[in-house]
Image (tube, helix red, strand yellow):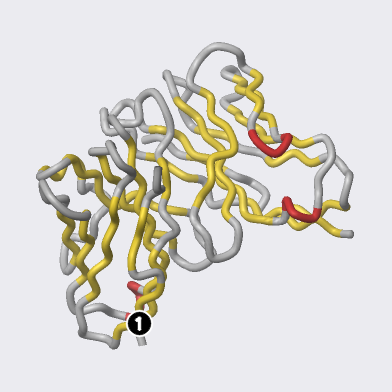
Amino acid sequence: NAGVMQNPRHLVRRRGQEARLRCSPMKGHSHVYWYRQLPEEGLKFMVYLQKENIIDESGMPKERFSAEFPKEGPSILRIQQVVRGDSAAYFCASSPQAAGGGEQYFGPGTRLTVT
Amino acid sequence: AQSVTQLDSQVPVFEEAPVELRCNYSSSVSVYLFWYVQYPNQGLQLLLKYLSGSTLVKGINGFEAEFNKSQTSFHLRKPSVHISDTAEYFCAVSDKASGTYKYIFGTGTRLKVLA
């Protein structure tokens, strides 16, 4: 059973460009969480999605950031008009339910560098 | 709101010595607790979790943690560390109150094992 897949692993964007980060959850998992890790900091929750629904986006910046988890295909975290402060590692985690009875399974992360 | 405190940002320890990494959280109201390890440029791997039951939890790689409700703590311990344990360790609380079970992470403790 393959783990959580994220791609690309490394992404370099110039200021003002768009970044698209993809997350394929583990097979059978329908819940996806996105977290951001700024340099030298812990992980901060961004958004929680179930298939075709955003459940909690309380950690998402109000502008430029969006997320989706379509019925088919991976979850996408999209950052428009990136700025240097967006440089971070973005981790996706999945769970078979709302993680109430167990843990979230993390992907290897996408490291975004904005130049 | 729930918060997690890892007071020690860095812990140096000699190989084969015991280690304790401290974690305190803000509310003891029905929490789930986790410890994850992150090796350089990798994702997070679950070490152990507390959901209910016995307050002493054993995890992988010889780690264990004790849930202390009165002190709202969940300290991680290992009786004898190896060089390979050098990594960053994150304590996390699952936010049950919101119904989403999103994680609130501490800022991490960097364990450096010295030869």
Disc 1: which residue: A12
Dot 1, how many residues are within 10 Å of its Cα: few (below 14), some (14-19), or many (20+)? few
Q: Quadrant of residue A49?
A: top left
In the image, taking residue A67 as reference, residue B49 lies left or right, namely right
Q: How many labels sit on residues?
A: 1
Going by the picture, which residue comes out furthest to the top?
A: B53
Rendered residue at 36%/88% (across/down): A115
Quarter of the figure with the C terminus of chain B: bottom right
Image position, residue A98 (x, y; %) = 29, 31
Q: Residue at x 56, y 46 (%)?
A: B90
Q: Is residue B79 above or below residue B55?
A: below
Left-right relation of A30 to B64: left
Determine whether, in the image, residue B115 is placed left or right of residue A111: right
Chain letter of the residue carrying label 1:
A
> Can you say which quadrant of the picture contains the N terminus of chain B?
top left
Residue at point 21%, 54% (across, down): A75
